[in-house]
Amino acid sequence: MNRILIVGAGHAGGSAAALLHQYGHTGPITLIGDEPYWPYQRPPLSKAWLKGEAGEDELQLRPPSFYEEREIAVRRSASIVAIDREAKTVRLASGEQVPYDSLILATGARARLLPIPGATLGGVLALRTAADAEALKARLGPGRRLLVVGGGYIGLEAAASARALGAQVTVVEREPRLLARVAGEALSGFFHAYHVQRGVRFVLGASVAALEGEDGQVRAALLDHGERLPCDVALIGVGAIPNQELAQAAGLPCQDGVIVDGHARTADPAIYAIGDVTRRPLPLYGRDFRLESVPSALEQAKQAAASLTRRPPPAPEVPWFWSDQYDLKLQIAGLPFDVDRLVVRGDPSSIRFAVFHLNGQVIQAVEAVNAPAEFMGGRLLIGARKPVMIEKLADPTVSMKEVAA
Amino acid sequence: MTKITYIEFGGTEHIVDVRNGLSVMEGAIKNNVPGIDADCGGACACATCHVYVDEAWREKTGSASAMEESMLDFAQNVEPNSRLSCQIRVTDALDGLIVRLPEDQH
């Protein structure tokens, strides 16, 4: 009997449980998560859900009956404190020991905190969990002042949703441009202008030195250059830290993420790791990377489930991401490694364009705004490592089908 | 509630009741109908909720937006009656809708 225990009931863990069943695993499957919810989707928390366009049960990855019908045991509000690799058990906070034959770590990542005075005041929030999103939503509304620390995707999505709810929004970003860690300059400039037109104020190249409060509630942020920004709620969106402590304490190799191979295996043959907590090989780019995305979590869930059920591994996917802000749909495929050339296809002022990042004639990544054909065609070409004709790629009158042909 | 029939690639039929306002994709997920992946959760970002709309229902389900059309253009095994099921809203007018699912979504 192969008892599979999955630690972490997020997108990665929930999907792994479903895939194991789908792939024909016949032994017991147990899913343990420390949140009180059934496995749910995090992406809408900063988008449709925050704006009130999606309800609670629409967040659920699958209905509770899904797990019941398949005899997948889901234990919620339960945290694991240790792994005993020798005995093949995990210990819960309650002291209970749960045995496994195979273990899948899907512990995710947590929001990075700001080590500044006032960081623990009421109204200083992160946006990672449904509980975080509830707290943020409760504090947003017409006239409320939201301060966002960090101009990354979470911050910008929350800013767009907060504007839709009538809140005033100021975003403080340490780097001189938005999305500095994750997107090219052309895209940064475009999103900056688009948010400004919709009333968001940006303070770039500045850090928050302290948060100030009254009666335990945040009331203002003090910036390093002396400016004071009044606010009713502060959202900290400055990146995430992998929840690798359990693996580390058990002696599994970690380096900003649990190190896994292309089958999601850790150094221990009985232990797999998937999702945001892992540092995984990206064969397309010849390097290891820690990806924080739903598609990556799904791919690794497939890798682990395939390996555990002795099925052929899934074909390597091109990493991809998406973000919704206002009426903009941003879709990104690939990662901009080893790039020596940029091609902008279409006109950014038309709010339908794509930025291709190339190495020679090979597309490494594409950032597509309201341009699904560029995203889909780009994704195909990235996966195929197929050189493209630059003149065709740069000419929006030539269809992506033809560019990809 | 609106009755929708999902037919898996292998022929298995699932006749389920779906709440109006949900998408045809959500109707499948909430009723544990296999064969629709919906990786992006309904953001029209991934093309993994591809279905074939029964000929009799093509008019009532409307036509794909330019965005959906472009996504479908690059999906596998696309037919004239292909749709992304996250983009079809369930209403009373779709009571009895029949959709067929592709062999796989990737």
Image (cartoon, helix red, strand yellow):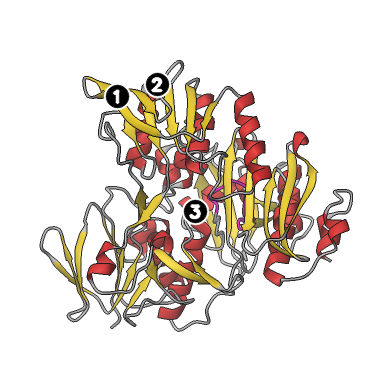
Q: Is residue B47 magenta?
A: yes
Residue appearing at x 71%, y 47% in the figure: B68
The residue indicated by pointer 1 is A212
Query: Could you give the CA–CA distance between mark 2 and mark 3, rounded to whole angstroms?
Result: 48 Å
The label nearer to you, 2 versus 3, is 2
Report the amino acid beneath label 3: Ile
Query: Could you give the CA–CA distance between mark 1 and mark 3, rounded to whole angstroms?
Result: 45 Å
Q: Position of residue B12 (x, y in %)?
A: 56, 66
Residue sitting nearer the eye, A394 or A314: A394
Label 3: how many Cα within 10 Å (few below 14, some 14–19, many 20+) = many
Cβ atoms under marks 1 and 2 closer than 8 Å: yes
Label 2: how many Cα within 10 Å (few below 14, some 14–19, many 20+) = some
The residue indicated by pointer 3 is B29
Residue appearing at x 69%, y 48% in the figure: A368
Q: Specify the segment rendered in magenta.
A: B40-49
* Above-or-below relation of A76 to A155: below
Residue sitting nearer the eye, A297 or A174: A174
| Quarter-of-image position of residue A245 | bottom left
Q: Is residue B53 visible?
A: no
Report the amino acid beneath label 1: Glu
Cβ atoms under marks 1 and 3 closer than 8 Å: no
Residue appearing at x 27%, y 47% in the figure: A36
Q: Secondary structure at mark 2?
A: strand
Q: Secondary structure at mark 3?
A: helix
Q: Position of residue A22 (x, y in %)?
A: 46, 71
Cβ atoms under marks 2 and 3 closer than 8 Å: no
